[in-house]
Amino acid sequence: MRIDIITVLPELVEGPLNCSIIKRAQDKGIAEIHIHDLRDYSSDKRHRRVDDYAFGFSAGMVLQIEPIDRIITKLKSERHYDEIIYTSPDGETFNQKMANSMSLMENIIILCGHYKGIDHRIREHFITKEISIGDYVLTGGELAAAIISDAVIRVIPGAISDEQSALSDSFQDNLLAPPVYTRPAVYHGWEVPEILLSGHQRHIEEWEHQQALERTKRLRPDLLEDPVK
């Protein structure tokens, strides 16, 4: 899988995507992440400006259409893209089902919003999907792009050495994960549930499912209201 991220702050994206599981996935050739500085495509070669004032009476600066057109057109001339994504507070809320679906794609572009936003013509003529990571506003879409990339890449086969671990994460079956424990079995009198020490796989799996269901009912009942979410 290849992910191209377009941003005005490359350094904000580079850190999270160059460590741990995501770095190992890139080292193995499972995923490629290419970060593009939008300022490199500015027609203003001296100041590398990519924003301007909004028409009308809106406050704040807006990313211009020209440099975004240049980079997206260049990338599309080199390969086919399954999705061109814009990180936006008013996009579809990102979830595990979406991450699983996107992990099957070959190439995606993520355009990071910044300032007051982007010229709306970009959304009308270039963007195929808009994604939000929650009902709040960030300084820019860079952290959202990193989160989306992390969630997508980690479920690609081979990214995690123990693939079963990824399949048992929260939200994979619309349930929160059950509680987990490790050694010592007793600490300050606090004991690990006896069933987990029994070695009986079927009974343990039944206990874990019941715990996952109870935790979901208590903490995230909304997940059970929509089984196809």
Image (cartoon, grey):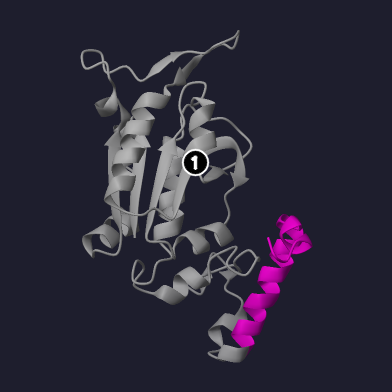
Q: Estimate how packed mark 1 is, as few (under 14), some (14 to 19) or many (20 or more) residues with alpha carbons within 10 Å.
A: some
Residue in front for this viewpoint, 167 or 102: 102
Q: Which residues are magenta?
A: 203-229
Q: Check residue 118 for magenta coloring.
A: no
Quarter of the rendering containing residue 35? top left
Quarter of the rendering containing residue 152? bottom left
Q: Is residue 45 above or below residue 188?
A: above
Most common SS among magenta residues? helix
Point out residue 45 in the picture as x, y percentages from the top left corner: 21, 17
Q: Check residue 205 for magenta coloring.
A: yes
Point out residue 131 in the picture as x, y percentages from the top left corner: 55, 44
Tell me if residue 182 can be seen.
Answer: no
Residue in front for this viewpoint, 4 or 41: 41
Tell me if residue 152 can be seen.
Answer: yes
Secondary structure category for the residue under label 1: loop
Residue type at mark 1? Ile
Image quadrant containing the N terminus: bottom left
Residue at 27% in and 18% down? 48
Give the residue number, with chain letter if any, for mark 1. 127
Q: Is residue 78 above or below residue 163?
A: above
Query: How many labels were placed on the picture?
Result: 1
Residue at 54% in and 84% down? 197
Image quadrant containing the C terminus: bottom right
Point out residue 125 in the picture as x, y percentages from the top left corner: 50, 37
Q: Is residue 96 above or below residue 205?
A: above
